[in-house]
Amino acid sequence: MVFMRRCFLVLLASSLLFISACGKASDVTTTQKGLQKQIVLWHWLTDREEVLNELAARYNKLTGVKVSCRLYAPSDAYSQKVMAAGQAKALPDVYGILGEKRIFAAFVNAGHIADLTSYMEYNDSEWGKSFFKKALEVNEFLAGNEYGVKPGIYGVPIDVMNIQLLYNKKLFRQAGINPNIPLTTWEEFIAVLEQLKHSGIKGLVGGWGETWMIDCFAHNYAFNIMGEEKVVDTIKGKVLYNDPDWVAVFRLFDELARKQLLVSGIVTMGNKTAEQLFANEKCAFAFNGFWCVNVYEDMNPDLEYAAMLPPRVSDKYPMVIWGGAGSSFMVNDNSRSKEEAINFLKWLTQKAQQTFLSKQTRSLPSNKDSLEYISPILTQFADDMDVVSHPNILPVQENPKVLEALTKGIQAIIIGVKTPEEIANEVCTIKAKVMNE
């Protein structure tokens, strides 16, 4: 009898340990009778930790639902945690996906992300219509997508982003250039860069040691020179990378390098270093995203600068810039607090909360009704949200091996070891191999 009792206690203790371990591993809070409702949210946003915690406290006071915001940084460590939790089916109620569309799709197909279409279809729902359309498109899978994901919206944007050119008004004036006259063409851009150079002022900086930044700049001009349809056809393999239009894109980098209009060392420079150079007024132009407003404010509050669209090369197609949703949250489709999680995200993206978040973090709100409260420099970014695109919005995405060949090839052009034509042919070779795999 004593033996049986001991066995029972051991089994009971083991069961409790197992249940406790499962609860800890899953990080998904269940709603039990008599217990406070709770939502667990994972994020990587170090600059918004305090603000998210404040908003979570307000939501708890308003609804009685506790939102536990848990920061995991840096972003690489966060991504690894999410990937591991996905494999272990141990994801929280709310989290974000950092990575390519294929990773996003894999989580959807694995049943880890809830389909939110019925909650926010922007043609029918006030919630969906409150967002920038391009921000929703980043989180949307269209019919016939290459990943086999059921068409729908699977994420909630909490801010939006785009990447533009920034210019220093003070340095413009030093070089005798009127900072209030917009530069609209590539020829005007080159002329201003050369005038700056003759005045002893360095020209364009960017974190082009990070190849995605080069990809961004190149695709801006690919859209402008050949249009979206031809870019998509290139990804599909219908157009070759040695097409004259692609060679024209590569020649832009060659021109900037040959005329010494880029800051020295740009191809090995991280974006943080590039931001420091521009903030400290060591160069006149920077290629950067909306997040720079926050960065520059911390580095040099007196910096006098403005944002502008990259100047167009062609009048045939519009200048399109990278942009869309900045940060997005997804709801775990397996969460026992799924409805509570959706309700929290609805509240978080309402006008009042978006305004507070934007003011405190100097970010661009995803709710269009909150734009009247943002700073003048952020307004310059927001005004161009109607001309944004992004690889994750396109119906197809380029193979990473091809993108690596393209971006590293452009770096080779900039340092003068390869010509635009050579890189065009090399990328074609890599593309052909990928297509035949």
Image (tube, helix red, strand yellow):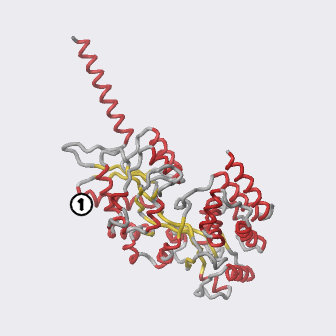
Q: Is residue 257 above or below residue 118?
A: below
Q: In what quadrant of the picture does the C terminus appear?
A: top right
Residue 134 in the image: state x and y as whole percent.
47, 67
Identify the image quadrant of the N terminus. Answer: top left
In the image, 44 versus 391, the foreground residue is 391
For mark 1, give the secondary structure. Answer: helix
Which residue reaches farthest left?
34
User: Residue 265: image x %, image y %?
Assistant: 72, 64
**Residue 210 seen in this snapshot:** no
> How many numbered discs, if any?
1
Q: Position of residue 85 (x, y in %)?
A: 44, 42
How would you rate the neighbour count of disc 1 (Cα within 10 Å): few for under 14, some for 14-19, many for 20 or more? few
Q: Identify which amino acid the numbered label 1 is placed on.
A: Leu
Viewer-proximal residue among 17 and 116: 116
What residue is at 38 percent from the left and 48 percent from the top? 332
Q: Quadrant of residue 368?
A: bottom left
Residue 227 visible (yes or no): yes
Instruction: Name the residue that disc number 1 marks.
Output: 62
**In the shown orientation, is residue 426 left or right of residue 29?**
right
On screen, residue 432 versus residue 38, left or right, reads: right
> Left or right of 40: which side holds 436?
right
Rendered image quadrant of residue 240: bottom right
52 to 31, vertically: above or below: below
| Residue 283 in which image quadrant | bottom right
For the point 66% across and 85% down, which residue is it?
174
Residue 208 horizontal side relative to residue 24, left or right: right
Question: x, y (%) of residue 413?
Answer: 76, 63
